[in-house]
Amino acid sequence: MEYVKINRILDALKGELEALPGPAFQEVRISSISGYETLFEAIPELTGFPAAVISPGGMEVRDLAASRTVELAVFVIDEYAASDREKAISCCEMLDEVYFLLSGSVPGAAFPLAGGRLLLEGMRPVDLDAMHVAWQFICKVSQSMIA
């Protein structure tokens, strides 16, 4: 037995985000950025907004490596327009779509993803630059070899 590879988890989450109604995003990317501060340096070709960037984070291993939890970050990015009410409304609707996807069909229940269980831990705004607004959704995907 072996765990589902992290790349497969990222691909599965990318597919879920791409399938949101609308579509919600012009671009959905996977990247190995260590923080939002380096997002545009790491992905300079990111120009289609709204966009989502998925990145792996840390990993917790338990039960002599029979269980693990992989942390993921989903960055939701859009162009900033302070006086555009429609843009503000569409950003909130997009955040709701991502929230409802990641929180699963039953509040408090894990969202099944690539053989694991994804739990949404929270969301926070991030400060990218003067031309963009962004939020980071923090998720953890639990996998286990123990039945």
Image (cartoon, helix red, strand yellow):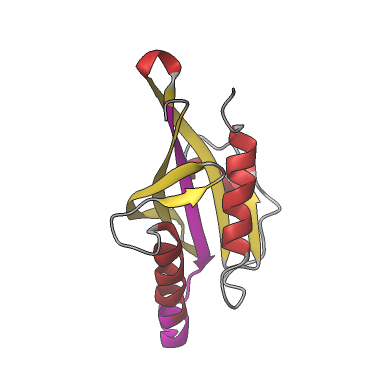
Location of residue 55 by image quarter: top right
> How many labels, in total?
0
Q: Residue at x 59, y 44 (%)?
A: 10
Q: Would you say residue 41 is visible in this rendering?
A: no
- Residue 9 screen position, x and y as percent: 58, 42
- Name the residue furthest front: 147
The quarter of the image holding the C terminus is top left
Q: Residue at x 65, y 68 (%)?
A: 26
- Residue 24 screen position, x and y as percent: 57, 72
Q: Would you say residue 14 is visible in this rendering?
A: yes
Q: State the residue in front, 51 or 4.
A: 4
Q: State the residue in front, 128 or 122.
A: 122
Inspect the magenta stretch and tell me whether residue 136 lies in it: no
Q: Is residue 4 left or right of residue 127?
A: right
Magenta span:
68-89
Location of residue 133 by image quarter: bottom left
- Residue 37 screen position, x and y as percent: 47, 43
Relative to 130, residue 139 above or below? above
Q: Residue at x 40, y 66 (%)?
A: 100
- Name the residue furthest top: 64
Location of residue 123 by image quarter: bottom left
- Residue 8 screen position, x and y as percent: 64, 40
Q: State the residue in front, 129 or 26.
A: 26
- Name the residue furthest right: 45
Inspect the magenta stretch and tell me whether residue 79 lies in it: yes
Relative to 131, residue 114 above or below? above
The quarter of the image holding the N terminus is top right
Relative to 45, residue 58 above or below? above
